[in-house]
Structure formats: C-alpha cells, structure tokens
Amino acid sequence: MAIELSSIDEALSRIKDLALKHSGRFIIGIVGKPGAGKSTLTSHLIENLPKDSVSLVPMDGYHLSNLQLKNLGLSDRKGAFNTFDSNGYVSLLKRINTETDQDIYYPVFHREIEESYAADGVVLANTKIVLTEGNYLLFDKAGWEKVATELTEIWYININDDVRIDRLVKRHEFYGKDKESALNWATGTDEINAKIVESTAVKADVIINI
C-alpha cells in the first residue's frame, strides 16, 4: 500500500526524514503524467534543501535526438516510452549509486530546441540526495523495468487532469506551437503517454495528491 501525501510540504518533510535515515547517497524517483508538476515539485524540494546536498537528474536528457526519431519513424510520438534511451538512463542511475567518490555528468534536455546537450548536468561527489523525474520510472517494458531497482523510493504525483492538460497547452504555446496545434498535441500524443503513466501508479511507494 502506497503512502499518501497531500502537499509538496509533506513531500519535503518526507525527504528530510529519509536523509536522516540514510548515511549515504539515495535516489528518489518522481513520476507523473505530462504536465503533472514534476518540475514544480522538484524545484520546491531543491529550494528547501541544503544546496550542496541535492542534485536533480531529469529522465528527459535521454530523449532520442530528432534525427534518430526521424530515422525510426517516431517523430510524431516524441515523448513515448520508446523514444528514449532507457538503457542509457539506467546506466546513469547505476553510476550515481556506485561511483560516489567522483563527479558524474549527464545529458540535459532543452525544450527550446527540443534536443539534449551532452554532459550538461553534474552530480557532484558530495551529493547525498538525488532527485530524478520523468514519466516512465515505473514502466515495465523496453528497459524501463530496470529503473526501479536503482531508486530508494518512487513517488507518483496525482493531479486533476483538466488542470494538467491546461498546463500542457500553455507550455506548448510558450515553446512555439499555435493554440490548435498545442491542444491537439496535449490531447493526442501527450494523452496517449499519460494513460501509460497512469497505469503504472499502482506500483509507486508514495502518492502525492496535489
């Protein structure tokens, strides 16, 4: 049975408790449908934890490039579970867990260009708390099934779908889509992915109701 939290402040309290219980590094995975507020939650946690103790490693850095998606015929499914390098992401998590005496670099996705920059982020050797967020941390196919064993806990964000979709439309408009295209993507491709993410919620350790 998952633990249920009712606010981001309760999530902050939980992560502080986990930090007291763990002598070494630990990784918390944060899952949610597109637009659920994963970045909002992680930003709040980071702002309220000691600066040198925490790092954020988004799953999105492992998006396949637009060229690879074109070659695979998956350009119109960008964001689906099979449009990421899941094995590369798992390898990074393994390194974060085991190579605690050195800095570890990782790719970061930049939405303004819809591509990732290699080695754009870093987990410093002295980092104790690592947050990693994305859609498919609880998915059980295509390599994603190896993610959960690398994470101390996985938290699922539960949010009203109308609020979530409205956020998505505004995000897509901000990054250049016209209103119709933004709505079509949010209720089309994004929603297909959202249904997959929702189906994995039963495996979460913690549910955060926002």
Image: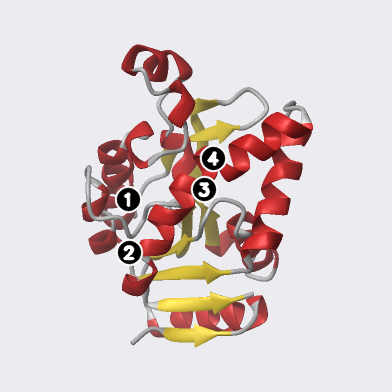
Q: Is residue 64 left or right of residue 53?
A: left
In the image, residue 66 sits, relative to residue 104, either above or below, namely above
Instruction: Kindly indicate whether the residue at mark 3 contacts the one at mark 4 (C-beta within 8 angstroms).
Output: yes
Residue bearing the label numbered 1: 93
Residue bearing the label numbered 4: 188
Say which residue appears at 54% left-offset and 80% top-offset.
Answer: 16
Q: Position of residue 97 (x, y in %)?
A: 30, 57
The kind of residue tagged 2 is Leu
Instruction: Kindly indicate whether the residue at mark 1 contacts the one at mark 2 (C-beta within 8 angstroms).
Output: yes
In the image, residue 73 sits, relative to residue 153, either above or below, namely above
Mark 4 vs mark 1: give the one in front: 4
Q: Secondary structure at mark 4?
A: loop
Quadrant where the C terminus is found in the figure: bottom right
Q: Which tag, 3 or 2, sits closer to the chain's start?
A: 2
Q: What distance separates the C-alpha of mark 3 from that of mark 1? A: 27 Å
Q: Secondary structure at mark 2?
A: loop
Q: Which tag, 4 or 1, sits closer to the chain's start?
A: 1
- Image-quadrant location for residue 196: bottom left
Q: Badge 1, how many Cα within 10 Å: few under 14, some, many 20+? A: many
Instruction: Kindly indicate whether the residue at mark 2 contacts the one at mark 3 (C-beta within 8 angstroms).
Output: no
Coloring scheme of the render? Answer: secondary structure
The kind of residue tagged 1 is Leu
Quadrant where the N terminus is found in the figure: bottom left
Residue bearing the label numbered 3: 191
Would residue 106 be seen by someone viewing this image from the given angle?
no
Q: Which tag, 3 or 1, sits closer to the chain's start?
A: 1
Q: Badge 2, how many Cα within 10 Å: few under 14, some, many 20+? A: some
The kind of residue tagged 4 is Gly
Say which residue appears at 61% left-offset and 69% top-offset.
Answer: 159
Q: Which tag, 2 or 4, sits closer to the chain's start?
A: 2
The kind of residue tagged 3 is Glu
